[in-house]
Image: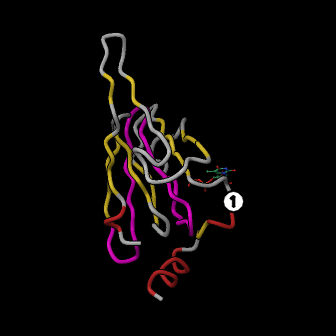
């Protein structure tokens, strides 16, 4: 899948003097069924995460607090997205190499995922990923 399939999606925001509210529904704001939610937190300064791709997994990443960068590569080009608001997120399609860095202190990265966790879906070797996408 090309990198252009991955994009920032702005979510609905119910602005309210009592506090704002944002929601996400399967196959509505995001193009897949949500089967799993996980989050990264307590990320130490200077740490990075990711460095892998997935065969079939679709994901949607939201910064629930603070900020971080997500760099995506389809094997041909790469793009870095800065996530720093809880009312938008980054849709990541399958077969996309990613790494996350520049986590601000106290940041929380929530990920909505299209499948339960399985290590079989991971490609953790960059050269294997490049072989798969370049044929
Ligand atoms: P990993 O996906 O490699 O982390 P990241 O891409 O955020 O750097 O996962 C780290 C560890 O957590 C690895 O041992 C697999 C495990 N894990 C689960 O057990 N369930 C999950 O839903 C996820 C995302 C990871």
Q: Measured along the vertical axis of the image, is residue 32 above or below residue 122?
A: above
Q: Is mark 1 within 8 Å of ligand 1?
A: no
Q: Position of residue 22 (x, y in %)?
A: 39, 29
Q: Measured along the vertical axis of the image, is residue 118 above or below residue 1?
A: above
Q: Residue furthest front?
A: 28
Q: Is residue 50 inside the magenta stretch?
A: yes
Check the picture and name the quadrant holding the N terminus: bottom left
Give the image quarter of residue 125. bottom right
Residue drawn at (56%, 66%), measured in percent from left and top?
A: 56
- Magenta stretch: give its range: 49-78
Q: Is residue 46 inside the magenta stretch?
A: no
Q: Nearer the viewer, residue 110 or 124?
A: 110
Q: What residue did someone put label 1 on?
A: 118
Give the image quarter of residue 88. top left
Tag count: 1
Q: Main secondary structure of the magenta part?
A: strand
Q: Position of residue 13 (x, y in %)?
A: 32, 29
Q: How is the image coloured?
A: secondary structure
SS state under label 1: loop
Q: Residue 58 vs residue 35: left or right?
A: left
Residue drawn at (39%, 53%), measured in percent from left and top?
A: 70
Q: Nearer the viewer, residue 75 or 34?
A: 34
Residue drawn at (52%, 80%), measured in percent from left and top?
A: 127
Q: Position of residue 58 (x, y in %)?
A: 51, 58
Q: Nearer the viewer, residue 73 or 25?
A: 25
Residue drawn at (34%, 34%), measured in percent from left and top?
A: 12
Q: Residue 45 vs residue 116: left or right?
A: left
């Amino acid at each position: 899948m090309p990198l252009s399939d991955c994009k920032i999606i702005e979510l609905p925001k119910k602005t309210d003097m009592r506090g704002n509210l944002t929601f996400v529904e399967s196959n509505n704001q995001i193009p897949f069924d949500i089967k799993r939610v996980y989050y990264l937190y307590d990320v130490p300064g200077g740490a990075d995460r990711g460095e892998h791709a997935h065969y079939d997994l679709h994901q949607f990443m939201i910064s629930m607090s603070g900020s971080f960068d997500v760099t995506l590569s389809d094997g041909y080009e790469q793009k870095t997205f800065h996530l720093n608001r809880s009312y938008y997120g980054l849709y990541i399609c399958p077969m996309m190499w990613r790494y996350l860095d520049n986590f601000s202190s106290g940041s929380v990265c929530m990920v909505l995922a299209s499948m339960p966790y399985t290590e079989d879906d991971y490609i953790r070797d960059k050269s294997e990923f490049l072989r798969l996408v370049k044929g």
